Image (cartoon, helix red, strand yellow):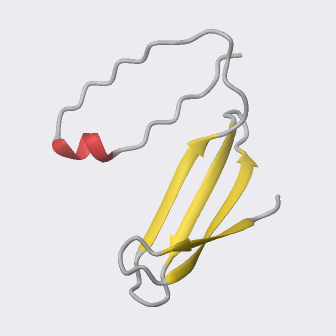
Amino acid sequence: QQVMVIPQDCPACSAPGELRSVLTHIPHFKEVVIMAFTCDRCGYRSNEVHPGGAYTDHGTTVTLHARTPADLSRSLLKRDRK
């Protein structure tokens, strides 16, 4: 697993920084891309997990019911069927 370092300005203070990204496989799940950014100047931090790899041939509809405002800020990762 090789960590990619991408130059990026901080979204909070515009100081130059680095976005670190790695493609990894989670057992019994799928490949995901993990990205992290930390600003040394203002302390801003961000991390994200995104699906990686290829898309499946057939689409799937997933319905998510949000019960609280906090539910709208969650990330949803769905495991592929096998």
Q: Position of residue 6 (x, y in %)?
A: 66, 68
Q: In the picture provided, is 21 more to the left or to the right than 17?
A: right
Q: Position of residue 32 (x, y in %)?
A: 65, 44
Which residue of the protein is positioned furthest toward the left in this rendering? 68
Vertical arrangement, residue 79 with respect to residue 14, above or below: above
Tally of numbered tags: 0
Quarter of the figure with the N terminus:
bottom right
> Residue 80, located in which quarter of the rendered image?
top right
Identified at 30% across, 46% down, the residue is 73
Vertical arrangement, residue 37 with respect to residue 76, above or below: below
Q: Nearer the viewer, residue 67 or 23?
A: 23
Q: In the picture provided, is 62 more to the left or to the right than 9?
A: left
Quarter of the figure with the C terminus:
top right
Q: In the picture provided, is 3 more to the left or to the right than 78?
A: right
Q: Position of residue 3 (x, y in %)?
A: 75, 65
Vertical arrangement, residue 5 with respect to residue 39, above or below: above
Q: Nearer the viewer, residue 12 or 1?
A: 12
Which residue of the protein is positioned furthest toward the right in this rendering? 1
Identified at 69% across, 35% down, the residue is 30
Q: In the picture provided, is 21 more to the left or to the right than 48?
A: right
Which residue of the protein is positioned furthest toward the top in this rendering? 58
Vertical arrangement, residue 64 with respect to residue 12, above or below: above
Identified at 56% across, 79% down, the residue is 17
Which residue of the protein is positioned furthest toward the bottom in this rendering? 41
Identified at 67% across, 18% down, the residue is 56
